[in-house]
């Protein structure tokens, strides 16, 4: 199980601390935390570029930045389980996500298909507009195909939270934000008007190949 993380901003740079056990903590190695681009930034609406195998090794630093930024956001806000590269100004088709209680995953060139006909409604949040919730409607299940850092291809069946998160992040790669997918004019709300989101994982991340 991952250790709880806390961000102390008094230092320069800020320090991330992990609570390893009751009464004990450890400083997490320095991270390259990047600013998260906010709603209204023009590049968030741009289509991201697909990678080739040769691109992956050249982008190690940016991928680490992506994971570090996600961890820092989680420590500060208490939520945020996935992030897309364009949210830190990297216009490549890359998504970082923590899958359940496992170590974070990196998805290169993720593609979604085989969407289930049944749709579900939920209030969606986003690191690029952290104070806003958007009610959207999306398929409740789909198949994910992606490459890993060794350029091996994987296929995964997603349901529940996993399907919702990956659809949200792949939309980012296509330059589409949740605000563009609101169900109607009443489907926007400030975070403070709703109860805190349940952060336990629901759904399936089932490896197919």
Image (cartoon, rainbow, N blue to C red):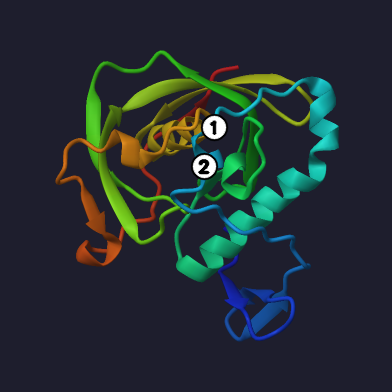
Quadrant occupied by the C terminus? top right
Image position of 166 with respect to 52: above or below: below
As helix, strand or loop, the secondary structure at mark 1 comes to loop
Residue at (79, 38) in percent of width and height: 59
Q: Which residue is more in the foreground, 98 or 20? A: 98
Q: Quadrant of residue 58?
A: top right
Residue 77 image offset from top left, x and y in percent: 46, 67
Closer to us: 25 or 10: 10
Tell me: residue 154, above or below residue 13.
above
Q: Quadrant of the N terminus?
A: bottom right
Give the class, few, some or many, for how many residues have Cα within 10 Å of label 2's Cα (few <14, many ≥20).
Answer: few
**Is residue 153 among the parts visible in the rendering?**
yes
Viewed as shown, does residue 112 lie left or right of 33? left
Label 1, residues with CA under 10 Å away: few <14, some 14-19, many ≥20: some
In the figure, is residue 106 to the left or right of 164? right
Q: Position of residue 158 (x, y in %)?
A: 43, 28
Please indicate, yes or no, whether residue 96 appears anywhere in the rendered image: no
Residue hosting label 1: 46
Q: Residue at x 63, y 30 (%)?
A: 93
Labels 1 and 2 touching (C-beta < 8 A): yes
Distance CA(mark 1)–CA(mark 2) = 7 Å
Percent across and percent down for residue 124 are 33, 46
Location of residue 10 by image quarter: bottom right
SS of the residue under disc 2: helix
Q: Which residue is mark 2?
A: 42
Q: Residue at x 36, y 40 (%)?
A: 178
Residue 172 percent coordinates (x, y): 49, 36
The label shown at residue 133 is: none
């Amino acid at each position: 199980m991952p250790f709880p993380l806390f961000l102390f901003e008094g230092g320069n740079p800020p320090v991330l601390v992990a609570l390893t056990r009751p009464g004990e903590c450890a400083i997490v190695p320095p991270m390259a935390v990047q600013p998260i681009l906010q709603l209204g930034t023009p590049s968030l609406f741009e289509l991201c570029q697909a990678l080739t195998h040769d691109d992956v090794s050249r982008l190690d630093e940016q991928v680490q930045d992506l994971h570090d930024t996600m961890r820092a956001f989680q420590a500060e806000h208490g939520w945020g389980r996935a992030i897309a590269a364009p949210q830190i100004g990297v216009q490549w088709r890359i998504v970082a996500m923590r899958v359940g209680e496992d170590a974070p995953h990196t998805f290169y060139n993720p593609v979604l298909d085989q969407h289930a006909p049944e749709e579900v409604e939920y209030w969606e949040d986003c690191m690029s507009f952290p104070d806003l919730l958007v009610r959207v409607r999306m398929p409740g299940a789909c198949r994910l195909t992606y490459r890993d850092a060794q350029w091996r291809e994987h296929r995964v069946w997603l349901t529940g939270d996993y399907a919702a998160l990956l659809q949200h992040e792949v939309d980012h790669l296509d330059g589409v934000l949740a605000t563009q997918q609101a169900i109607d004019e009443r489907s926007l709300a400030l975070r403070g008007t709703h109860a805190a989101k349940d952060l336990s994982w629901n759904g399936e991340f089932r490896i197919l190949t």
